[in-house]
Image (cartoon, grey):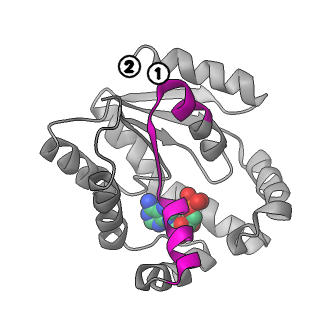
Amino acid sequence: MLNIVLFGPPGAGKGTQSEKIIEKYQLSHLSTGDLFRKHLNEGTELGKTAQKYMDEGKLVPDSVVIGMVEDKIKDTPDTHGFIFDGFPRTVAQAEALDELMTKLGDYINGMIALEVPDKELKTRIKKRALTSGRVDDQDDDKINTRIKVYKEETLPVAEYYHKQGKFHKTDGVGSIDKIFSSLTRVIDQL
Ligand code: AMP
């Protein structure tokens, strides 16, 4: 299996690039944000729990996220591997993912961080807000909270993979195709 963590702040282009990666490498996409939005639309208990955190741009508690990821992995047998998008977002989640992978007799091949300056992130999220319908894309306060949460709670995850010798980064600014080819150069070495 090829298991990749696609890392980066909100608006870095993780979703867009994940779609292209899963097509090229025949992987399964595991986006915790997408899974939460699906639960929200379906009105499940999990969706109701997540909503208040999501609407404010804060992180959903680790136990809820990890349980959901475990279920999704179990529901995806016979895959060539996963692109983890928007997960792990805390060191506790990264540790839980390593445990899950070990249970499956597998491991994370590498993390790739998409690097994009804050100003560009805000511009992209506001543009996305015009079509995404996402409450958390709509106003400056929520966008700023998400970027702050990323820096305080999520950035240490990069260090976690760095210590394991699995950290890679690419420039996340430029055309979608240019960024994709930088990503494939890294993935082909994993
Ligand atoms: P995203 O689509 O990845 O930007 O996620 C949207 C929102 O879902 C985030 O702002 C969080 O409220 C929640 N969320 C998604 N993934 C996670 C995660 N791994 N840990 C905690 N909360 C998450």
Instruction: Judge whether 32 appears above or below 160 on screen.
Output: below
Q: Position of residue 38 (x, y in %)?
A: 54, 69
Question: Residue at left 30%, top 35%?
Answer: 108
Query: Where's the N terminus, which quadrant?
Result: top left
- Does dot 2 land on a helix, a strand or a loop? loop
Magenta segment: does it hold 32?
Answer: yes
Callout 2, which amino acid? Answer: Leu
User: What's the distance in space between the residues labelled 1 and 2, CA to CA?
Assistant: 5 Å
Question: Residue at left 56%, top 44%?
Answer: 8
Crowd tier of the residue under label 2, counting other residues whose Cα lies within 10 Å: few below 14, some 14–19, many 20 or above: some
Name the residue that disc number 2 marks.
190
Crowd tier of the residue under label 1, counting other residues whose Cα lies within 10 Å: few below 14, some 14–19, many 20 or above: some
Instruction: Judge whether 118 appears above or below 39 on screen.
Output: above
Query: Which quadrant of the figure has residue 93?
Result: bottom left
Name the residue that disc number 1 marks.
187
Q: Position of residue 26 (x, y in %)?
A: 47, 30
Instruction: Judge whether 167 appears above or below 185 on screen.
Output: below
Query: Where's the C terminus, which quadrant?
Result: top left
Magenta segment: does it hold 155?
Answer: no
Please give the range of residues in magenta: 20-43
Query: Which quadrant of the figure has residue 21?
Result: top right
Instruction: Judge whether 58 appears above or below 127 on screen.
Output: below
Question: Residue at left 61%, top 78%?
Answer: 56
